[in-house]
Amino acid sequence: MNRVDAEHWDAVYGTKGELQTSWFRPHLDESLRLIDALQLPRSAALLDVGGGRSSLVDDLLKRGFGDVDVLDLSAVALAEARQRLGARGEQVRWLAGDVTEIALPVARYALWHDRAVFHFLTDAEAQARYLAAAARAVRPGGHLVLGTFAEDGPERCSGLPVARYGADALAARFAPLFERVADSRELHRTPAGTEQAFTYVVLRRRDRDDAAEADLQA
């Protein structure tokens, strides 16, 4: 991922309305269900990776979370979301950058959420950088809620190739630093009326001793 990718997504968000993008949902229902099940304290630090102009940040604020960061490659999308929120947007930390390159605070987040970013990383090096970023930024005992296209999902999105996963394969990409605590499947209906299959996993960040022991046993 590089500057070209940021320009690509700025162009997408700059020329297409919400109903013209296949990933749009009024609310990220499955993500919210999985996040609610974690019963996080309202003081917890949360990060929405690839949040763009998603409504997830709105729903997190409505739930009383007061420490929310939103990261996206597209400054255009972030500006739209911030404008939509109005005064509430001042409560959010907006981060424009590449998740595999940006310097995030160490062990800050109790929750890292990503719906449909990781599956755009189709080479092992980029996937490894993503995993390293998540492992640094999520505190021990914190959680990663991750959604990607399922094995029977689309092969491309917004003109770009994607990687597709079942729950076992997706969880395995993050082991042993993260352990799976839940998984699910969603059929997302696009604004155009087609269905896209998604895989979700909920992963817990192991502490260093647990991760080292799991690595030895693997």
Image (cartoon, rainbow, N blue to C red):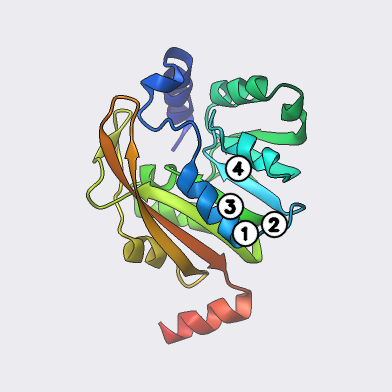
Q: In this view, which residue lies farthest toward the top?
A: 15
Which amino acid type corresponds to the residue marked 2 in the rendered image? Val
* Labels 3, 1: front one: 3
Front residue of this view, candidates 146 and 101: 146
Q: Residue at x 29, y 28 (%)?
A: 159
Residue at image coords 60%, 25%: 81
In the picture of the structure, the residue carrying the numbered disc 1 is 136
Q: CA distance from mark 2 to mark 3?
A: 13 Å
Q: Amino acid at mark 1?
A: Arg
Q: First in sequence, mark 2 or 1: give its number.
A: 2
Q: Which residue is at 73% across, 44% downward?
A: 64
Q: How many marks?
A: 4
**Earlier sequence position, callout 4 versus callout 3:** 4
Position of residue 94 relative to residue 110, above or below, is above
Q: Which mark is residue 106?
A: 2
Q: Residues within 10 Å of mark 1 (few under 14, many from 20)?
A: some
Which residue type carries mark 4?
Answer: Ile
Q: Position of residue 129 (x, y in %)?
A: 49, 53
Q: Nearer the viewer, residue 189 or 206?
A: 189
Q: Residue flagged by tag 3: what amino acid is it?
A: Trp
Left or right placement of residue 140 versus residue 166 in this view: right
Q: Residue at x 29, y 24 (%)?
A: 192
Label 3: which residue?
A: 112
Q: Residues within 10 Å of mark 3 (few under 14, many from 20)?
A: many
Residue 68: percent from left, percent from top: 69, 43
Q: Left or right of 86: which side holds 216?
A: left
Q: Quadrant of residue 155?
A: top left
Q: Are marks 2 and 1 in contact (CB under 8 Å)?
A: yes
Q: Secondary structure at mark 1?
A: helix
Q: Which residue is mark 4?
A: 102
